[in-house]
Amino acid sequence: MAKRFALIGLSLALALNATAQTSLSGQSTVNTVTTAVPFLRISPDARSGAMGDVGLAITPDANAQYWNVSKIPFAQKKYGISTTYTPWLKDIVPDIFLAYISGYAKFGEKTPQAISFGFRYFSLGEINYTNISAEPIGTGKPNEFAFDLGYSRQLSPYLSTGLSFRYIHSAIASGLATGTAGIDYKPGNAFGADLGLYYTKTKDLDDFRSTNFSFGAVISNVGSKIAYSSTRRDFIPINLGIGAAYTYKMDEYNKITAALDLNKLMVPTPQDTSTTPGVKKYTIPEKTVVSGMFGSFGDAPGGFGEELKEWQISAGLEYWYQNQFAVRAGYFYENKDKGDRKYFTCGLGVRYNVFNLNFAYLVPSGSGINRNPLSNTFRFSLMFEFDDLKKKEGETTTP
């Protein structure tokens, strides 16, 4: 049964005609914006995952490569590396997961700069393919991955920018013979880039108290379309993200951060192509990458009101005690007509010397097809951040 569920998801991803139909019976119209390789928008960071998936403007660490590469020059340490394991559909399919590793190295005394990398691997487990008559037609282990390289630098004491380049490979039909159902399946390949901006400024109130305001903006996954056959090319999840964070350090032991992120896919909204009265049939229009990006802010069939529905909202809180123990909580909201993902998150963090360990838990929400794939799932990230690659003789390290 689990394999059949995975196969259903794979079949949807491979559909050559992405359409949706909704009755006009006075109810709201569901018109979800979709793209290929959606794993690129799965948060691979347990810290942000515990804060409702905010990450554009919170303090930088080794996972900034995913959220906003321009934050890295403001990282407190010169080097950092992080790895995260995320089970996917754990309650239904045991062998689907997302693995992530990222890291950075800072250099430059007068003008702090950094190089960074990231690697995401999404395994869809083992799938037994069947045709419409339930006859076996092959077995495979579909998978997708993306590799990033980034560069960032400070422009002033408060402002920085960064750029990442990305290679994407998606073999979601692995093991399925070419020509099955008359379609020439093949792995998809694409290239993308992220461009980010980060502003941060701290104001000291006295010897122990201070405030910090940070702002981040990123356009991510700007690049080529991806194709799984010779008949169709699909958009990758080009996204605009805007975020802000405010930190209040109450004394030498306690500080709290509140953060808010807004995200919108910069891809075409499906358009109504139905010829049947009383029924809407939505089809993704054929557009170039550039026209799809710029047109995404005004192409919703329902006008400005529907455009507003396409923005996703993430809100999170983080409390630190002595910079060693953290408690986190957050909420993610997506309009019911644009995917209907709504969930609470929580988590913990522990920091000691160069070692950081973060946990995230997504509170179970929804049911059936509306159930979040990460419901009742623990994510964890292991991170190391340090200033020296080699420890000097006789030197001791303190928190």
Image (cartoon, grey):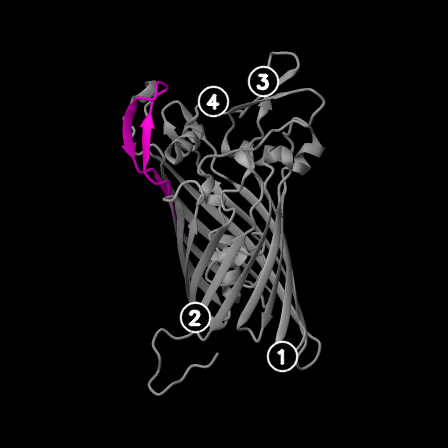
Front-most of residues 227 and 374:
374
Residue that numbered label 4 is attached to: 17
The Cα atoms of the two marked residues, 4 and 1, are separated by 58 Å
First in sequence, mark 2 or 4: give its number. 4
Among the 4 quarters of the image, the one containing residue 203: bottom right
Question: x and y percent of residue 58 in the render?
Answer: 58, 60
Q: Which residues, given as a range, are shown in magenta?
A: 123-148
User: Could you say which is closer to the camera, residue 132 or residue 157?
Assistant: 132
Which residue is under mark 3?
273
- Counting from the top left corner in percent of width and height, residue 54 is at 58, 54
> For the residue marked with disc 2, what is the amino acid?
Phe
Q: Position of residue 64 (x, y in %)?
A: 49, 58
Mark closer to the observer (2, 3): 2
Sequence order check, earlier mark of 4 and 3: 4
Real-space Cα distance between discs 1 and 3? 61 Å
What residue is shown at x 48% (from left), y 55% (from top)? Answer: 45
Circle 1 Cα neighbour tier, 10 Å, few/some/many (<14 / 14–19 / ≥20): few
Name the residue that disc number 2 marks. 355
Residue density around tag 3, few if under 14, some if 14–19, many if 20 or more, within 10 Å: some
Work out whether mark 1 precedes mark 3 in sequence or the reverse, and give the earlier one: 1
Q: Decide: is 241 above or below 161.
A: above
Three-letter residue code for mark 4: Asn
